[in-house]
Image: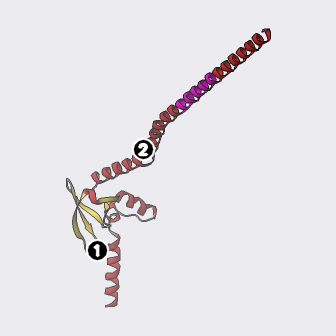
Amino acid sequence: MKINKLIASITAAASTAVTASATALNAFAEESQQTTTANQQQASMGSLLSMPLMLVVMFVLLYFIAIRPQKKRDRELKEMQQSLQVGDEVVTGGGIVGIVVSVGEDTVVIETGGAKHKLRIKNWAITENVSAAERFKEAKSAGKTSSTVEAAAVVDDDDNKKSKKKKNDEE
């Protein structure tokens, strides 16, 4: 009987040990699973927080690379269009080159070509302004001394005068 009691108590102890081990393993597995789940949640929260941050960084880069320079060019173009003066050589968006004859509120009259044709155009159509002062400085640095009015002359006029001289010489 003692042996049966001993075997029964060893069996009970073994089953208790197996049950305790299984319970401990289950508890450890659940804890590690919860830890893994918590780590995954923290990682997903980190990625959720970094995504808006990346979007903000991308928008800031886009602003400084594309939007800001374009606004600056638009502002400079508008200032140039508002500061037109008589005698300025201008180029329109369509490629027409002429000298400003008169300036109105929203229109400008320009003189084009050797035949001095006059065109009335809108201010917004002017894309470039080569001022008479800049041409005068260029002419002065080239060694020519001329007045501002002469410096504002269209290049076509010089070509027209040369062709008239050639015709007169031929006759």
Q: Residue furthest bottom?
A: 171
Query: Where is residue 31 shown, x and y percent of the image?
Result: 60, 23
Q: Nearer the viewer, residue 115 or 148?
A: 115
Which residue in the rendered view is the most extreme toward the front? 1
Q: Earlier in the sequence, mark 1 or mark 2?
A: 2
Magenta residues span: 26-43
Which numbered tag is attached to residue 63? 2
| In the depicted structure, whether residue 44 falls above or below residue 128 | above
Which residue is more in the foreground, 121 or 137? 121
Q: Residue at label 1?
A: 114
Residue closest to the eye, 114 or 40? 40
- Cα–Cα gap, marks 1 and 2: 46 Å
Looking at the rendered structure, the secondary structure element under dot 1 is: loop
Residue 57, percent from left and from top: 47, 40
**Is 43 left, or right, of 58 in this rendering?**
right
Q: Position of residue 159 (x, y in %)?
A: 35, 76
How packed mark 1 is, by other alpha carbons closer than 10 Å (few <14, some 14-19, many 20 or more), is some
Depicted 99 relative to depicted 62: above or below: below
Amino acid, disc 2: Tyr
Tell me the quadrant of the picture where the C terminus can be found. bottom left
The local crowd at label 2, few if under 14, some if 14 to 19, many if 20 or more residues have their Cα within 10 Å, is few
